[in-house]
Amino acid sequence: MVVKSVFEKLAIKTLSVRLGEVETETDLSKDQLLALNTSLKALGFEVIDNKKIRTIEKIKNAIIRLVHHSDSELKTNLSDFITAEVHQEYNYLSNLFSEAEGTTIEKYYITQRIEKAKELIVYDELSLSEIADRLGYSSVAYLSNQFKKVTGFTPSHFKALKEFKRKNIEEL
């Protein structure tokens, strides 16, 4: 909503405004781009005009939407999902992501799932079995194993910690 209001204030017509992506009706002039950049930076946002960086952000945003903002689990494999979301060949996307981020798309996906598991554990509304099911794990043991690899704690030990530390999505 904040980003959309900046575009409206600058009288730049948009076709769509989604997480990390805005599609405009026309190409922006240099003056419009400068004004947009200035307005967005004042609000803690930035314009990403590098095609490779935009592609990486599309991958991250697709995974974040899947893990954090969707109630349905992944019904296909991750590579097919990313290919469908970004509309590029997965091998290219995988190499680009690994080169730029220093981690694989799969590890980023696992990290997001574990952060979501932490959130659900902290809320204490679901059992570990329900959390595993919601996040698409085949078993509680598989979730627990992956949780321990990423955090160093078992889910039950994490739950018992008085001062738990969750990471913001932006920090991942």
Image: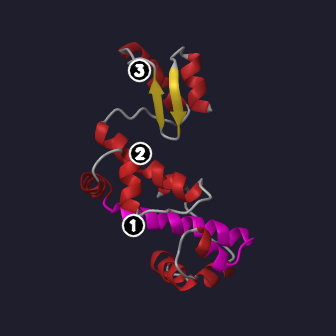
Which residue is at a point 54% across and 14% down the rendered structure image?
Answer: 11
Residue 97, relative to residue 107: is it above or below?
above
Residue tagged 3? 33
Secondary-structure class at tag 3? helix
Is 171 in front, or is 24? 24
Q: Amino acid at mark 3?
A: Leu
Q: Is residue 108 magenta?
A: yes
Q: Can the viewer see residue 165 in this picture?
A: no
Secondary-structure class at tag 2? helix
Mark 2 vs mark 3, foreground winner is 2
Which residue is at a point 40% across and 13% down the rendered structure image?
Answer: 31
Is 80 in front, or is 163? 80
Is 66 in front, or is 119? 66
Q: Residue 56 at what x, y percent from top left?
A: 36, 47
Alpha-carbon distance for marks 2 and 3? 21 Å
Q: Residue 35 at what x, y percent from top left?
A: 46, 18
Q: Amino acid at mark 1?
A: Lys
Q: Amino acid at mark 2?
A: Lys
Residue tagged 1? 107
Q: Which mark, by number, is residue 58?
A: 2
Mark 1 vs mark 3, foreground winner is 1
* First along the sequence among labels 2 and 1: 2
Q: Residue 60 at what x, y percent from top left?
A: 43, 51
Which stretch did the figure color magenta?
102-131
* First along the sequence among labels 1 and 3: 3
Specify few, some or many for label 1: CA neighbours under 10 Å numbering under 14, 14-19, or 20 or more.
few
Residue 35, relative to residue 115: is it above or below?
above
Image position of 55 (left or right of 168): left
Secondary-structure class at tag 1? helix
Decide: marks 1, 3 in contact (CB < 8 A)?
no
Which residue is at a point 75% across and 71% down the rendered structure image?
Answer: 125
